[in-house]
Image: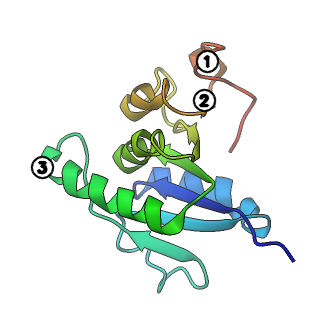
Amino acid sequence: MSKKQKVLAIASPGGHWIQLNKICNPLEDRFAVVYVTPGAQYSSKNEGSRRVLNITDASATSKSKLIPLAFQLLWILIKERPTAIISTGAAPGAIAFLLAKFLPIKTIWVDSIANTAEISRSGRMVKNHADLVVTQWKSLSDGKNIVYHGSIL
């Protein structure tokens, strides 16, 4: 029996987390999914058999926390050795994607369904670094760096 490939699923709490779970729940049969979030309410203790790693809550407005967050994420990437990272946003996913660029880890960014008029700030940051950036709105696809393949959620 072969070991399942590991996927790191990273999102900020709230809507990003809800969307990430809707995308990743069906993947749990095929992959070993490890969830990463700054949302302490989403701990392994509260999520049953799922592995949920909690990290520092940081955003573009809390710049002093971005460096500690980057070190936490680097440690998680080294320790967990995922084959791929998937994120729906925001800052934690973007930082993990930038770090993954230096490691042999594939990255998939699914921009939040709430971004109907433009790609998110984090999505714009990672669009040239991610292996795949997906938008859920056809009008936001540029056909090159940001793709639309239909509704995901």
The colour scheme is rainbow
Q: Position of residue 147 (x, y in %)?
A: 65, 23
| Mark 3 vs 2, N-terminal side | 3
Left or right placement of residue 136 versus residue 39 in this view? right
Distance in Å between CA atoms under marks 3 and 2: 30 Å
Residue at 69 percent across and 25 percent down: it is 148
Left or right placement of residue 2 versus residue 34 in this view? right
Q: Which residue is mark 3?
A: 64
Amino acid type of the residue tagged 3 in the rendering: Ser
Viewer-closest of 47 and 69: 69
Amino acid type of the residue tagged 2 in the rendering: Thr
Residue at 55 percent across and 59 percent down: it is 8
Left or right placement of residue 144 versus residue 81 in this view? right
Q: Position of residue 136 (x, y in %)?
A: 63, 31
Quarter holding the C terminus? Answer: top right
Q: Which residue is mark 1?
A: 141
Label 2 environment density (alpha carbons within 10 Å; few <14, some 14–19, many ≥20): many
Front label number (3 vs 2): 3
The picture quadrant where one finds residue 144 is top right
| Mark 2 vs 1, N-terminal side | 2
Viewer-closest of 92 and 137: 92
Front label number (1 vs 3): 3
The answer to whether the residues at label 2 and label 1 have Cβ atoms under 8 Å apart is yes
Looking at the image, is 89 positioned above or below residue 73?
A: above
Viewer-closest of 57 and 8: 8
> Which residue extends farthest left?
64
The answer to whether the residues at label 1 and label 3 have Cβ atoms under 8 Å apart is no
Residue at 52 percent across and 26 percent down: it is 116
Distance in Å between CA atoms under marks 1 and 3: 33 Å
Q: Which residue is mark 2?
A: 135
